[in-house]
Amino acid sequence: MTYIRELVRVGAFPKPIQEGRYLKWDLVEIDRYIEAKKN
């Protein structure tokens, strides 16, 4: 979770996640989002 929190801190995720609702995201969805950002 530390890694995801770091991404949130630097604004790598869309607004809903920045507002702290990222915890409701399915981990697979978070994985896909991170992969999509890399490509």
Image (spheres, grey):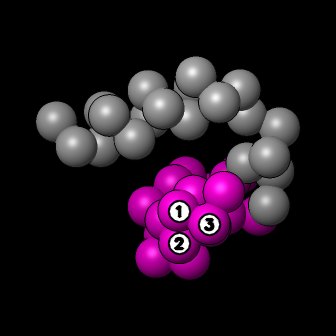
> Badges 3 and 2: C-beta atoms under 8 Å apart?
yes
Q: Residue furthest front?
A: 2
**Mark 1 belongs to which amino acid?**
Tyr
Query: Residue 28 occupies which quadrant of the picture?
Result: top right
The reply to whether discs 1 and 3 touch (Cβ–Cβ < 8 Å) is yes
Q: Distance between the residues labelled 3 and 2?
A: 6 Å
Q: Is residue 27 left or right of residue 37?
A: right
Quadrant position of residue 9? bottom right
Give the SS element for disc 2.
helix
Return the residue at label 2.
Answer: 6
- Does residue 22 appear to the left or right of 35 in the view shown? right
Query: Marks 3 and 2: which is nearer the front?
Result: 3
Q: Which residue position holds label 1?
A: 3
Q: Which residue is rendered at x = 48% and y = 32% of the image?
A: 31
Residue 4 point in image, percent of width and height: 57, 58
Q: Is mark 1 on a helix, strand or loop?
A: helix
Does any portion of residue 8 appear in the rendered image? Answer: no
Q: For the C terminus, which image quadrant?
A: top left
Residue closest to the eye, 20 or 2: 2
Magenta span of residues: 1-19
- Dot 2: few (<14), some (14–19), or many (≥20) neighbours within 10 Å? few
In the picture of the structure, the residue carrying the numbered disc 3 is 2
- Examine the residues drawn in magenta and state their main secondary structure: helix
Q: Which amino acid does label 2 sit on?
A: Glu
Q: Are marks 1 and 2 in contact (CB under 8 Å)?
A: yes
Q: What residue type is disc 3 on? A: Thr
